[in-house]
Image (cartoon, rainbow, N blue to C red):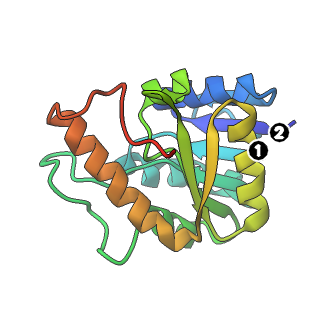
Amino acid sequence: MTHVSIIGSGNMGQAISSVVARGGNTVELFNSTDKDKPVTGDVVILAVPYPAIDQVLADRADQLSGKVVVDITNPLNFETFDSLVVPADGSAAAELAEKLPDSKVLKAFNTTFAATVASGQVGEVPTTVLIAGDDADAKAQFAGIVSAGGLKAVDAGPLKRARELEAVGFLQLTLAVGEKVAWTGGFGLV
C-alpha cells in the first residue's frame, strides 16, 4: 500500500483521490487552506492549474524532496485558450523537474477529464492514464496505483514525452471548451 498526497481538491483532485482509495492505497487531499499541514505521502500529485505550481513550490518544495511528484497540469494560456505557455521544445513537467532535482517527476492524468477518471470509462473504453517519466521504478509504482484503482496505465516513455502529452491535453481541452467533445468524453486507447 502506498500513501498518496494530492495537492488540489478540485474536480481532478477529488476524482484521482477516489481512484487511489479504490485501489486500497491511503490518500490525503490538500486544499488551499491546508498550507500548514505537512505533505506526508510517498507519492504527491499536483492537481492544481499550471499557474499555481510556483506557489505550491514556494510553500512545499522541501516537502517534495525525495518523493515521486506527479504533474497533471496543462500549461495553456487561460486568457486566450489558444496556445501553450511553455517553449515548443519543453513542457511544464520538464520545468518542474528542473525545480525539483531531488524528486522523481512524472507526467500523468493531463489527457483525461475528471468525469472519465471518476467513471473509469471514455465511452466504451477504459480510461487510460498515460505516464511519462525518467525513473522506471517511479513509473511502475504509479502505474500500479492507477491500475489498482481500476484505470488503464500506459507507459508513454521518458519525461521528454510530456511535451506531446501536454499538446494532446491542450487539444482535448480546446475541443471541450468549443463544445466539440463533452467533458464526459475524450480520447481513449484501444
Please tell me which residue lies in front, 114 or 39. 114
Q: Amino acid at mark 1?
A: Gly
Q: Residue furthest right?
A: 1
* Residue 68 percent location from the top left of the image: 70, 55
Residue 32: tell me if it is visible.
no
The residue lying at 63 percent from left, 41 percent from top is 152
Secondary structure of residue under mark 2:
loop
Amino acid type at circle 2 is Thr
Residue for point 45% across, 51% down: 53
Residue underneath mark 1: 144
Query: Quarter holding the N terminus?
Result: top right
Which class describes the residues within 10 Å of circle 1: few (<14), some (14-19), or many (20+)?
Answer: some
**In the depicted view, which residue is nearer to us: 39 or 176?**
176
Task: Kindly tell me whether residue 1 is visible in this rendering.
Answer: yes
Determine whether 79 is above or below 12 in the image. below
Labelled disc at residue 2: 2
Relative height, residue 103 to residue 90 (above, below): above
Q: Are marks 2 and 1 in contact (CB under 8 Å)?
A: yes
Earlier in the chain: of badge 2 and badge 1, it is 2
* Residue 32 image position (x, y, % from top left): 49, 30
Quarter occupied by residue 179: top left
Q: Secondary structure at mark 1?
A: helix
Q: Nearer the viewer, mark 2 or mark 1?
A: 1
Q: Is residue 144 above or below residue 117?
A: below
Horizontally, is 22 left or right of 93 in the view?
right
Dot 2: few (<14), some (14–19), or many (≥20) neighbours within 10 Å?
A: some
Residue that appears at 19% across and 58% down = 83
Which residue occupies 18% across, 35% down? 180
Q: Position of residue 100 (x, y in %)?
A: 60, 66
Whether residue 152 sits left or right of residue 180 in the image: it is: right
